[in-house]
Image: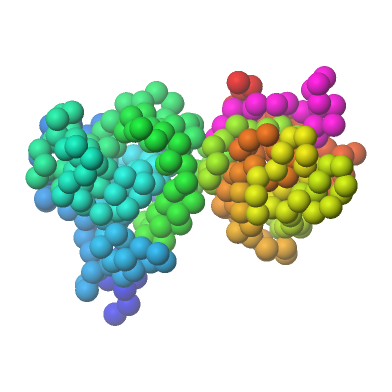
């Protein structure tokens, strides 16, 4: 029997138990999608949930990418705990990214001061006993129990949501792990056959269009001070996953960064400069139905898609950076009509996205 079959069987048995207990309801049965967006708060005083510990395939979890079987098993514990508590999928990614930063997905017996476990939670701060916090399921319950009490967490950049739970001395560090966490959660859910709807989570639109990142608009379309600004800047931290705003075909993947004074190549292996550099840095153009095109600029590293590739709405295509003509990490996002990738085809993304029921966040 295949690994996928065995894991899927285990998921099915687990799902039957959870459904009988009223845990996931329509989430696993494909009912009202909104039901999966209702946060369920885990009891802060709950004992380790040994009866609900995550299944593992026979022989244990395999290594996935850079993560060994033990690390993957701990990530799976987080994912299945999030599913059991009906936390939206976005929360699973936030939790896995946090554990990647805090413990490299190891249930550590100790750490800084009295920190313990996957999330390096501290008994002295009321998270639980050291024995409880070494249990990945209990630690995940406590993380999710705090996360879902934070107002607007689904729409926050990942690093902000994680920091609101962890109160870390390095609040920006979590952003680094968004792409690896998304990939690992996707692989685990694909292996188990767990339905995930959209990894963009409840903060993002779930229709034919979605927000490329969940972040406020920092600089608008062709504003008075920047009449040549043919898109909007979305102020997401470095490393934030960028998603295709709609299904389509990748038209362009390239590095566009040159010295402003000479036109000589600047390169995209380093950040750009608002005065010394021109160009979009690492960027992607995607063709959509009805002659629409979207552009995603200043990626931190080469995009994860290729020219001619078909992409689905919400599919990761790269991560936020500051390459090209840029003063700091953000996503420059453009929408064009008539298939015209030049400035002549650019339209204001803010009203356009609003008409697609995928409104961008307000200017901040």
Magenta run includes residue 220? yes
Residue 181 placement (x, y as % from top left): 42, 51
The magenta-colored residue range is 214-230
The residue located at (72%, 63%) in the rendering is 307
Residue 84, picture quadrant: top left
Residue 8, picture quadrant: bottom left
The residue located at (77%, 28%) in the rendering is 221
Q: Quadrant location of the N terminus?
A: bottom left
Left or right, residue 357 beside residue 19: right
Residue 109 placement (x, y as % from top left): 16, 49
Residue 342 placement (x, y as % from top left): 87, 44
Using the rendered image of the protein, determine whether residue 267 is visible from the camera's viewpoint: yes
The residue located at (65%, 42%) in the rendering is 322
Give the answer, above or below, for where 91 lies relative to 255. Answer: above
Counting labels gives: 0
Residue farthest right in this picture: 344
């Amino acid at each position: 029997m295949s690994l996928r079959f065995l894991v899927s069987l285990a998921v099915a048995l687990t799902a039957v138990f959870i459904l009988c207990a009223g845990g996931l309801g329509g989430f696993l049965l494909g009912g009202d999608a909104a039901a999966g967006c209702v946060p369920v708060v885990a009891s802060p005083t709950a004992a380790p949930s040994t009866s609900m510990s995550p299944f593992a395939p026979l022989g244990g979890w395999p290594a996935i990418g850079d993560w060994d079987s033990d690390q993957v098993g701990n990530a799976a514990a987080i994912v299945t705990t999030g599913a059991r508590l009906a936390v939206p999928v976005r929360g699973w990614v936030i939790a896995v990214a946090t554990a990647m930063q805090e413990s490299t997905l190891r249930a550590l017996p100790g750490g800084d001061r009295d920190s313990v476990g996957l999330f390096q939670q501290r008994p002295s701060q009321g998270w639980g006993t050291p024995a409880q916090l070494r249990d990945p399921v209990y630690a995940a319950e406590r993380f999710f129990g705090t996360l879902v009490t934070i107002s607007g967490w689904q729409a926050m950049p990942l690093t902000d949501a994680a920091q609101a739970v962890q109160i870390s001395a390095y609040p920006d560090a979590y952003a680094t792990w968004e792409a690896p966490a998304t990939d690992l959660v996707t692989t685990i859910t694909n292996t188990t056959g767990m339905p995930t709807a959209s990894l963009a989570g409840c903060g993002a639109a779930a229709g034919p269009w979605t927000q490329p990142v969940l972040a406020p608009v920092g600089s608008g379309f062709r504003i008075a001070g920047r009449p040549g600004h043919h898109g909007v800047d979305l102020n997401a931290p470095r490393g934030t996953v960028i998603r295709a705003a709609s299904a389509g075909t990748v038209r362009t993947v390239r590095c566009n960064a040159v010295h402003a004074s000479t036109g000589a190549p600047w390169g995209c292996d380093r950040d750009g400069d608002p005065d010394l550099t021109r160009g979009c840095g690492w960027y992607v153009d995607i063709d959509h139905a009805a002659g629409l095109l979207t552009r995603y600029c200043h990626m931190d590293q080469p995009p994860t898609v290729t020219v001619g590739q078909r992409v689905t709405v919400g599919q990761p295509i790269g991560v936020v950076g500051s390459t090209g003509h840029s003063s700091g990490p953000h996503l420059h996002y453009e929408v064009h009509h008539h298939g015209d990738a030049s400035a002549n085809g650019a339209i204001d993304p803010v009203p356009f996205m609003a008409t697609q029921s995928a409104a961008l966040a307000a200017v901040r």
